[in-house]
Image (spheres, rainbow, N blue to C red):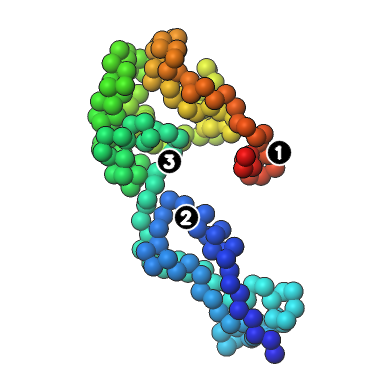
Amino acid sequence: MKTLKYITLFAAISTSLLFVQCKDDDDNVIIQETCTDGIMNGEETGVDCGGPDCEPCGLVLDFSGTYVQEDQMGRPGINTVFGTDGFKDAFNVTVPSQMQAAFQEKFETKLLGLNPGYTSNALGLDAPTFTTVLSNDVLWLAQSGITTYFNGTEILTGRALSDDVIDVSLLLIFGGPMGDENPGLTSDGVPTNDVAFSSSFPYLAGPF
């Protein structure tokens, strides 16, 4: 009889990635159990644990504990720009349904502090309307049509990997109604990735 204990490092990493915005206070993600030929937890499994099909034995996910939200990132960079006046952490732990009431006025104050001459932007949104959209930090996704953060016509219908979301945000904050105001402030000067996106899932570029 062979007894194997699986130290499931990769399973723990995979599970933690699924809950990137959460924290389990007891940090117990995996229960490691002993798997003996054909028997697991005292019950017959029909699996020969000395063979290639034994691998599932002992892999038990533990979802008990208390989970709390630690981060919020519907649209990249929003909290980085607007949450700098002492409420960044509060914003991160607020659920989207409560964000507008809690943060819209703070966002508007920050917007007008960044751009005192703000009237409207390339989307035609005045300061209260624009900050209402921004303070509800979720990434909208159209069920049909083009997926784009902003391509000059479609707006916030999702996010393609190649979308320059920082430039779009700067344009909407500083560019004015026609997008031609404050040209030195409407781009971060980084036009593309250093590394090409992958052609297979998950499509993200590799480390550089």
Tell me the distance, in whole angstroms, between the alpha carbons under discs 1 and 2.
Answer: 26 Å
* Amino acid type, residue under disc 3 in the picture: Met
Vertical position of residue 25 compared to residue 108: above or below: below
- Residue 120 in picture, x, y percent from top left: 35, 14
Q: Position of residue 174 (x, y in %)?
A: 39, 17
Q: Which residue is mark 3?
A: 73
Q: Quadrant of the N terminus?
A: bottom right
Residue that appears at 52% across and 17% down: 152
How far, Cα to Cα, is label 3 from label 2? 13 Å
| 99 to the left or right of 38 | left
Q: Residue at x 51, y 70 (%)?
A: 30
Q: What residue appears at the point 72 percent right and 74 percent down from the top-left corner?
A: 53
| Amino acid at pointer 1 | Ser
- What amino acid type should be assigned to the residue bearing mark 2? Phe
Q: Which numbered disc covers residue 19?
A: 2
| Helix, strand or loop status at disc 2 | loop
Residue 127: tell me if it is visible: no
Pick the residue in front: 155 or 207.
Answer: 207
What label does residue 199 carry, if any? 1
